[in-house]
Structures are given as structure tokens and as C-alpha cells.
Amino acid sequence: MYSQNEKVVYPGHGVAVIKRMLERKVGGRSTRFYELEFINKDMTILVPMDNIELIGIRKISSQKDIGVLFGMFAEPIVPHQNEIALNWNKRNKEYLCKIRSGKLKEICEIYRDLKHIEKNKELSFGEKSLLHQTELLLAEEIALACDIQPENAMHQLRNLAQKVQQQS
């Protein structure tokens, strides 16, 4: 159970604040909701409290989790021969499933993989868009977990990606 004004991660959309908890009648029965207001989007949604786990809403990662994330990101990629050659549609489907999971590690893997692909070839429009989306999701959570400005988190993320690319 979450509390009012707590920040949570909503898969695929980023960080939101629980503005209030309310009860409404839906289909003849009383249902309790969290009202989530996203911090970097002009969007507010109602989420049934019973569906929190199913949706994948979770607490903001800890600084320790972010450290592990950076360590994983820094591990060199050993792509399978056909991984980069896979058509974009198949990779995109896999990436979207990972984003919808809301798991920080999986979002980081997408970012890392796209940065690796970008090193070897120009990304398509869709890939660039996905790279940008994952970068924003990561930076937003890193900023809150580490209590830094989102711009600084973005800078750290990009520096790490550049450092890893230079090493490989």
C-alpha cells in the first residue's frame, strides 16, 4: 500500500506522485483508486488499488539499485551474431514489452543495447525515439533515487554510455 504524496514508477510513463486515494462506484461496486499525477507529463490517471501489482507500479529505486544498474550498464556487451541483424519490428516488440514491465534493469538493457547498435549503424527514427524514451525514464528515476537534478542524471547516463562505447 502506498501513501499520499509518495512517488512511484508507472511502467512506460515514468514517475508519478500519488495525489490522493479515492473511492468510486464502478459497475455497481465500490472501487478504491490512487490518483497519480506524472511529474514530467501533463497527465493524471486513476489506478484501481487492486491492480497495482498487475500494472507493475513500484517504488522508486534506491541509490544502491542505481549503483547496481550503472555496474550492469558498464558491463561489455557481447551481442549474438544475429542480434543486431534482427529486424527492427521484432526488436521493437521485445523492447516495448520490457518498457511495459517497468523493471529498471530491463529499461537499462534497452538503452545499453540501442547505444551499442548506434555505435555500429545509424539508428532508425523508431530506434532513436525508443532510445530517447528509455533515456528519459532512466534519468527521471536516477534523479529521484540519487537526489540530483534530472539534467545531472541525464549527463551521468550519457557519460557512462560514452565511456562504455569507447571501451568496446
Image: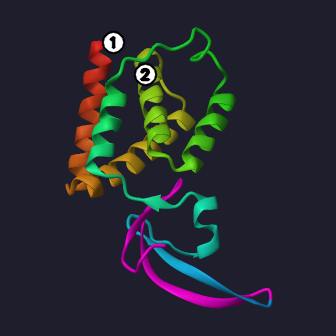
Residue behind mark 1:
168
In the picture shown, does residue 132 fall above or below 151? above
Q: Secondary structure at mark 1?
A: loop
Label 1 vs label 2: CA separation?
A: 9 Å
Q: Secondary structure at mark 2?
A: helix
Residue behind mark 2:
116
Tell me whether circle 1 and circle 2 mark residues in contact (CB < 8 Å).
yes
Residue 13 coordinates in the image, percent (x, y): 50, 58
Residue that appears at 46% across and 13% down? 78
Q: Nearest the camera: 83 or 106?
A: 106
Residue 49 coordinates in the image, percent (x, y): 59, 75
Question: Which residues fall within the magenta stretch?
Answer: 1-27
Does the magenta segment cover residue 148?
no
Residue that appears at 79% across and 91% down? 28
Residue that appears at 27% across and 16% down? 166
Q: Nearest the camera: 73 or 134?
A: 73
In the picture shown, does residue 68 fall above or below 3? above
Q: Nearest the camera: 158 or 75?
A: 75
Does the magenta segment cover residue 24?
yes
Looking at the rendered structure, the kind of residue marked 2 is His
Residue 30 coordinates in the image, percent (x, y): 70, 89
Residue that appears at 31% across and 52% down? 62
Mark 2 crowdedness (10 Å alpha carbons): few <14, some 14-19, many ≥20: many
Q: Is residue 60 left or right of residue 55?
A: left
Q: Is residue 48 visible?
A: no
Mark 1 crowdedness (10 Å alpha carbons): few <14, some 14-19, many ≥20: few
Q: Is residue 44 left or right of residue 30?
A: left
In the picture shown, does residue 51 fall above or below 77? below
Name the main secondary structure of what is drawn in magenta.
strand
Q: How many numbered discs?
A: 2
Looking at the rendered structure, the kind of residue marked 1 is Ser
Q: Nearest the camera: 65 or 81?
A: 65
